[in-house]
Amino acid sequence: VDGGVFCLAFSPDRKRIVSGGESGSDDPDQHPTLQLWDANNGSRISSAFTPHAATIFAVAFSPNGKVIASASEDKTVKLWDAATGNEMLPALIHTGGVCAVTFSPDDRQVLSGDSEGNLTFWNAETGRLMQKISAHQGPVTSATFNREGTRIASSGVDGKVKLWDAATRSELMTLTGHGGAVFRAAFSHDGKRIASSGHDQTVRLWDAVTGKAIAILRGHNGDVYGLVFAGNDNCIVSGSDDRTVKLWLIDPKGDRPQAVDSEK
């Protein structure tokens, strides 16, 4: 990799990894590229993807593993054939840089979030713009569906996590409490909880049904950018610019689960 890596995603079968970032060159003719890797041995499979014109901020595999989406500061989302690296459709054009991208669980929709605070829904097969909604005051930093595809969680630099009805695309609730930008929001596998992380150096756990704050996990000494539920939803993994990755073990007993930072 020639430049900084800003994002990566595993294929659904966990056999491949796609990564994106910056070009790492001052040459204006050198553009950021996507790299595809073998998850078992770390070897590069392909870097044949047509480049974006600016930094790639987000990547995602479709649930069926056949399509890769990439989102860029160049105001586009591109869809690629995961097997050949060929661009499948004309670029999906936005009015601002694109910071987040994901697929709906049924592979039918692409959801993107941009620097102007919009969430945009696209037909994944045709590239048709389905709907754009004003979601946050400032850039959208993440957007994700729950496993059933019925709910969407988004986060923004406005310090909010928002929960949306995926069918009507209407806002259900706003989760507030972070002291500054929220960089990531993620559903647990069972969809009952949402975890979020941000500039205030915390990971926060929420009830996805009521919006009630369950726990505040403190321990990082920098912005927390990476976040994922692991195991049987009994563990949260977070990554920070304090150069640490922390494992938070969630005790499911009681109304207020206790979180234990396992990284010392």
Image (tube, grey):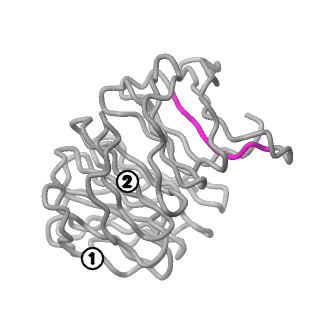
Give me the disc on residue 249: 2
- Locate residue 46 relative to residue 103 in the image: left or right: right
Q: Which residues are magenta?
A: 17-24
Q: Residue at x 65, y 50 (%)?
A: 55
Three-letter code for the amino acid on which mark 1 is drawn: Thr
Reply above or below: 61 against 207. above
Query: What residue is at 85 percent from the left and 44 percent from the top?
Result: 27
> Which marked residue is nearer to the observer: mark 2 or mark 1?
1
Q: Secondary structure at mark 1?
A: strand
Quadrant of the image for the N terminus?
top right
23 drawn magenta: yes
Magenta: main secondary structure equals: strand
Find residue 76 and report its horizontal and vertical position in percent. 51, 49
Crowd around label 1: few <14 · some 14–19 · many ≥20 (10 Å): some
Going by the numbered disc 2, the residue's amino acid type is: Leu
Considering depth in this image, is 231 or 75 the residue closer to the camera? 75
Q: Residue at x 50, y 29 (%)?
A: 87
Quadrant into which the C terminus falls: bottom right
Residue 99 versus residue 40 in the image, above or below: below
Q: Which residue carries the number 1 mark? A: 174
Residue 264 falls left or right of residue 259: right
Rendered view: 112 above or below 13: below
Question: Residue 54 colored magenta?
Answer: no
* Secondary structure at numbered mark 2: strand
Residue for point 43% across, 33% down: 89
Residue 207, position in %: x, y?
21, 67
First-in-chain label (2 vs 1): 1
Q: Residues within 10 Å of mark 2 (few under 14, many from 20)?
A: some
Residue 246: x percent and y percent? 52, 54
- Give the x, y percent position of residue 146: 23, 50
The Cα–Cα distance between marks 2 and 1, rounded to whole angstroms, is 26 Å
